[in-house]
């Protein structure tokens, strides 16, 4: 069964079946505010309002926050390392650190 998707920015496209829809949801190409309808129907439904997709959308949202946290921590550690290297080269920090 073919589906039509309309994203928040107004882009519309078709996908061949529900398997492709699940793939797009898991890869975070689609969001809860994007809309969907079966080809031939006139009413659009918000993806976040469809019970079958709510769990997948929640999983995608929670994993996104996890990735952001890891990236923030990695960035902060890199900044601290760069500051220590600069201070070491200036001679203000002992090499024992």
Image (tube, rainbow, N blue to C red):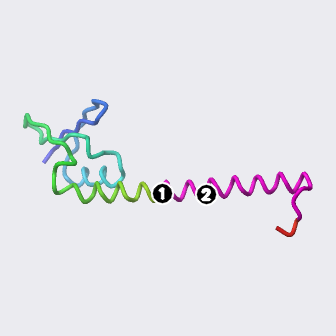
Q: Is there a contact, CB below 8 Å, between mark 2 and mark 1?
A: no
Outermost residue to the bottom: 96
Please give the name of the residue rendered at 7% of the width and 37% of the height, measured from the top-left corner: 41
Q: Which residues are magenta?
A: 67-94
Looking at the rendered structure, the number of numbered marks drawn on it comes to: 2
Please give the name of the residue rendered at 8% of the width and 36% of the height, measured from the top-left corner: 40
Image coordinates for residue 60, horizontal then vertical, percent: 34, 56
Please give the name of the residue rendered at 26% of the width and 46% of the height, measured from the top-left corner: 32
Image coordinates for residue 91, horizontal then vertical, percent: 92, 55
Indicate the quadrant where residue 96 lies.
bottom right
Outermost residue to the right: 91
Image coordinates for residue 10, horizontal then vertical, percent: 27, 30
Pick whichever, 37 or 88, lies toward us.
Answer: 88
Image coordinates for residue 47, horizontal then vertical, percent: 21, 46
* Label annotation for residue 67: 1
Pick whichever, 21 or 62, lies toward us.
Answer: 62
Instruction: Assess whether residue 81 is covered by the magenta stretch.
Output: yes
Residue on which disc 2 sits = 74
Lateral position of residue 34 relative to residue 80, left or right: left
Badge 2 or badge 1: first in the primary sequence? 1
Please give the name of the residue rendered at 35% of the width and 49% of the height, measured from the top-left corner: 28
Q: Secondary structure at mark 1?
A: helix
- Quarter of the C terminus within the rendering: bottom right
Q: Secondary structure at mark 2?
A: helix
Pick whichever, 95 or 44, lies toward us.
Answer: 95
């Amino acid at each position: 069964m073919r589906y039509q998707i309309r994203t928040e920015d107004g882009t519309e496209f078709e996908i061949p079946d529900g398997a492709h829809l699940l793939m797009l949801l898991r890869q975070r190409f689609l969001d809860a505010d994007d809309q969907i309808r079966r080809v031939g129907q006139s009413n659009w439904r918000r993806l976040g309002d469809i019970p079958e997709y709510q769990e997948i959308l929640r999983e995608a949202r929670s994993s996104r926050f996890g990735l952001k946290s890891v990236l923030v921590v990695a960035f902060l550690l890199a900044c601290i390392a760069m500051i220590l290297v600069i201070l070491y080269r200036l001679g203000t920090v002992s090499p024992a650190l």
